Image: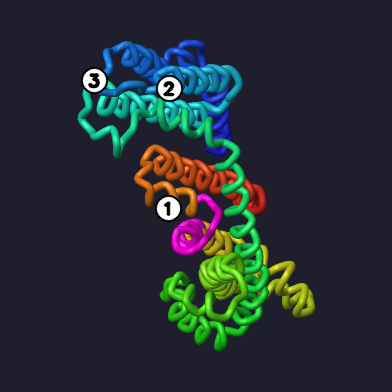
Amino acid sequence: MSSSLSSTATTITKGNRNMTKKNRFLRIAHLFFIVLLLSQLLPNKNSVNPETAYTVWVAVGIEVLAVLSSLFIKEKKSLNLFLDIVTFIYFFLFLWTLATAKFNLLPESLFPPPGKIIACLVKDRVKIGQNIISSLEIIVEGYVLGIIFAIPIGLFLGWSVRLGNAATYISKFFGSIPPIVYIPYGIALLPTFRSVSVFVIFLATFWPVFAGTMSGVLNVERKIIDSAKVLNVNQFTMLFSIIFPAAMPEIFIGCNQGLSVSFILLTSAEMIGANRGIGYYVKQYSDFGDYTRTITGLIVIGLVVILISFLFNKLQRYLIRWKK
């Protein structure tokens, strides 16, 4: 029975890795690429300069990546995922182009054609890069501080069942309060708005990581703890060499929650009173009615969050690879 299962698993693995050229290159993504290019040839309606060339160059760049991925990605599942994302991007750009420059279904003052957004991204790349760096510096400071404080405290409190159960309700109470409401107190007590932003990110990170750590510790299998006690390990080794690794999956759940909320709160805080940052970039130009740059800023925020989340998930899979 086991040999049969092993043979089946091997066959599936080989099927994933040894895809035919047809499976690799005859994809719907490439069809949508052609459709997107052909849509750029349609006459423009009311749009004076939709910057079509920028849309074409972006589409060509994405298509090059798609072809290279088809050549070098060995896993069928990974290739399917990437090409599905590419297909969605092509389809979205196609609909966006038709609804704006080609048929004028959306007012161009509020919804510029994709070419104008891409052109703005190229033109403002230095300014956008500086604002991204400013935002990421605040995120890193507040997020790292939150993790540094939350994990040890969660380990020690979660190790005591009595304290852990009480602290769980306390964390639920404080965690349910949106950290952004502390901004007025932060402005009154802290010297700069940057320190206020770091403080808000710290709170946004601390409570979910703290709750995830305690939950992970409280839910560690009893047989793991009993086995460690049989070996007479000391408390420090028990906490940081046994309990901590076993609790890491739930700790990472809290870390993911803290990361997502941190980006939302930072953008909100920057739109309230900052003088730099990607949230400030969006707010500044929206106040002047420059919706081309406003949408550009929104897209940049989304791309940055996706990239950071992707890298964080890679780190998570690496650190808890033993769970597989």
Question: How many numbered marks appear?
Answer: 3
Q: Which residue is mark 1?
A: 283
Secondary element under disc 3, as helix, strand or loop, is loop
Dot 3 or dot 2: first in sequence order is 3
Q: Is residue 215 above or below residue 113?
A: below
- As for residue 28 lying within the magenta part, the answer is no
**Considering depth in this image, is 299 or 128 the residue closer to the camera?**
128
- To which quarter of the image does residue 84 belong? top left
Res 196 label? none
Res 55 label? 2
Q: Which residue is mark 3?
A: 45
Left/right placement of residue 15 relative to residue 285 reads: right
Asked whether residue 215 is in view, the answer is no
Dot 1 or dot 2: first in sequence order is 2
**Considering depth in this image, is 63 or 234 the residue closer to the camera?**
63
Secondary structure mainly formed by the magenta segment: helix
Mark 2 Cα within 10 Å, few/some/many (few <14, many 20+)? Answer: many
Asked whether residue 276 is in view, the answer is yes
Span shown in magenta: 263-278
Q: Position of residue 310 (x, y in %)?
A: 55, 44
Mark 3 Cα within 10 Å, few/some/many (few <14, many 20+)? Answer: some
Q: Position of residue 173 (x, y in %)?
A: 43, 81
Secondary element under disc 1, as helix, strand or loop, is helix
